[in-house]
Image (spheres, rainbow, N blue to C red):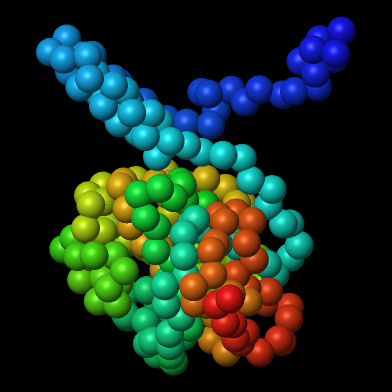
Amino acid sequence: MIWKNLKKNIVMPNIFQIIHSDGWKFIAIFAAVAFLMAMVNPNLGWVGALLTAWCMYFFRNPPRTVPMREGLLVSPADGIVCQITSVVPSADLELGNAPLTRVSIFLNVFDVHVNRVPIAGTVHKIIYHEGQFLNASFDKASEKNERNTVIVDTIDGHRIAFVQIAGLIARRIRCDITSLESVETGQVYGLIRFGSRMDVYLPEGMDPLVIEGQRMVSGETVLLDMNNSEPARRGIKR
């Protein structure tokens, strides 16, 4: 009786909902290779099975609870804030000539790599840049690496740019939204495979609510509150 009651109250996630659609072809390839490895040697088969399980883990797309107050900008990616710096954005971003705060989030191969829209609005422009595949944690990756920039005009007139950046291992960027499309905060819009970085350019004069070294949760961690004048935060590791 207790077990029956537990089963009624436990909601099992649908595996087809928590795995990003882009991942199934890779999972199938990993599984096929694992099968061939098992045919050669059972021990190799176990190695292949572990790699297949990791591939499923990599392409996971867990649901997130998105804060929905006007003016909040959430993290577009899981990972660690590797850098917060002031830079003059390139002219093609159409963000003006004044220095803006850029928050960079580094994703390792164990982080969720599904990317989410940080704030609601209308997609003004999408810019794809060919480039190199340097280590995504390097500062010059923002300028040198292959990347895809999305620029969103918010409802209250701000312009936000967020950039998917390929890394040393990541060689493919997927973006599933288009110019002039209306997007919602926390909406899944793309993916980077297999280890990468996200940059977010904040509006002029606004400080983030996160600090370097902080772990981010895409769609949930509030990166900026545009209705709050709180100064930039400081932190210490303990």
Res 1 → quadrant: top right
Q: Nearer the viewer, residue 169 or 142?
A: 169
In the image, residue 152 lies at what x, y percent?
Answer: 51, 64
Please say if 172 is above or below 82: above
Which residue corresponds to the image point at 74% horizontal and 65% vertical from the top-left? 70
Is residue 124 among the parts visible in the rendering? no
Taking the image as shown, residue 58 lies to the left or right of residue 137, namely right
Horizontal placement of 184 versus 200: left or right?
Answer: right
How many numbered discs sit on the rendered protein?
Answer: 0
Toward which corner of the image does residue 63 lie, by quadrant? top right
Residue at x 47%, y 59% (from the top left corner): 79
201 sits left or right of 71 in the view: left
Residue 91 lies, with reference to residue 98, above or below; the image says above
Q: Is residue 219 or residue 163 the one in the foreground? A: 219
Horizontal and vertical percent position of residue 189: 47, 47
The quadrant in which the C terminus is found is: bottom right
Which residue occupies 81% across, 10% down? 4
Tell me if I can see residue 228 in this picture.
yes
Left or right side of 133 for 58 = right
Please provide percent x and percent y for residue 119.
60, 61
Nearest to the observer: residue 150 or residue 17: 17
